[in-house]
Amino acid sequence: MPGTATTRTETTRTETAGTETAPAATARAVAARTPVTVEEVVGRLREIAAALPLADGVAVFNRLYLTVTEAVRDRLAGGYFADPPAMAELDSVFAGRYLLAVAADADGQEPPACWRPLFALRAHPGVHPLQFALAGMNAHIQHDLPLAVVDLCRRRGCEPADVEPDYHRINGVLAEVESVVREQLLPGPELPQCAEPLTHLLGAWSVEAAREGAWSAVQALWELRRLPAAARAFTAALDGSVGLLGHALLLPLVPHDGYDARTGEHADAPGTAAAARLPETRSRTAGGRSDGPPAGSTPERASAGTDPGDQAQLECSGLPSA
């Protein structure tokens, strides 16, 4: 169940000489507080973004989630939703589950099973940023969202059918954001080794299908609300199955020697997160031009002696090479 955590292997934590790093401490403090308003959710996501390395897999999803949340917030006024207060409350309850996962990981504990693949592989150099975005959406939509809708209905004393029209209206918002994200994160023709597998992933997983599946889970959970044991079993099965799909979405495009996916560590540099060594992923503009890294960043570049395997890894990570 979300919010329940068991201590995980200490080597997966980002620590130095037993002292928690500032970004980890900041992320934990930010995530631990329960949001009340949509503006508070937006502020919390911005704080987490500021506390994490730009290339970190969780940071990639966090930026996407921030964009979606801002888009939903902007439509709470103006008549887009039939019940804006209910959608605002759902937004906060929904975000709270992601924030619990962030807090658990920052505290050295395991997040729910649906989130573990993203947190475990967040620094893997063979995983493309688009994969991180998909894995985060997979966990948050297919697991957290149905639980959040059921929580909302219990809190407001309503039925899922009462919020269903607005639930589906959010699909329009997500479709707009998804098109922008695809443009920004998909590699251009200059990165052919990554384009085909990423296109396959996008064809196999979609936000619309995920949200339809989540609504089916809402209906099942609502029918099981008077059968606590059955509801817990359903929720646990949902958590595990979504986690398995998350692992598949994060299959590294380029194998990296010395990387242990179980611990998130590199054999050649124990205890060092790969994300700390990676620059921000370059994004492509609507016209197809690749933008360079933001001002103030200092991306590493491949040396003239980079072997073909390492060069392929750089290309599929969306990173600049020499």
Image (spheres, helix red, strand yellow):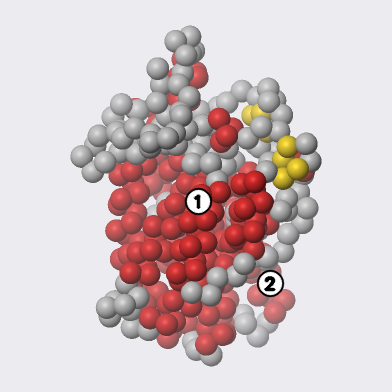
Count neighbours of disc 1 (C-alpha within 10 A) and say few if under 14, some if 14 to 19, many if 20 or more: many
Q: Which residue shows up at 45% across the image and 41% down it?
A: 129
Q: Residue furthest bottom?
A: 157
Q: Is residue 57 above or below residue 164?
A: above
State the image quarter where residue 275 is shown: top right
Q: Position of residue 243 (x, y in %)?
A: 60, 53
Q: Nearer the viewer, residue 285 or 15?
A: 15
Residue wearing tag 1? 49
Q: Which residue shows up at 44% across the image and 76% down it?
A: 88
Q: Residue furthest top?
A: 305
Q: Dividing the image into 4 quarters, which one contains the N terminus?
A: bottom right
Q: Which of marks 1 and 2 is nearer the N terminus?
A: 1
Indicate left or right for 318 with 180 as reference: right
Q: Position of residue 65 (x, y in %)?
A: 45, 57
State the image quarter where residue 78 is shown: bottom left
Residue 236 in sight: yes
| Element class at badge 1 | helix
Residue 218 in sight: no
| Element class at badge 2 | helix
Residue wearing tag 2? 232
Q: Dividing the image into 4 quarters, which one contains the C terminus?
A: top left
Q: Which residue shows up at 52% across the image and 66% down it?
A: 95
Q: Is residue 264 above or below residue 159?
A: above
> Amino acid under label 1?
Ala
Indicate left or right for 147 with 210 as reference: right
Q: Which residue shows up at 42% across the image and 77% down it?
A: 87
State the image quarter where residue 169 is shown: bottom left
Q: Position of residue 141 (x, y in %)?
A: 49, 62
Q: Which of 302 and 52 is in front in this view?
A: 52
Q: How many labels does the image show?
A: 2
**Picture disc at residue 35:** none
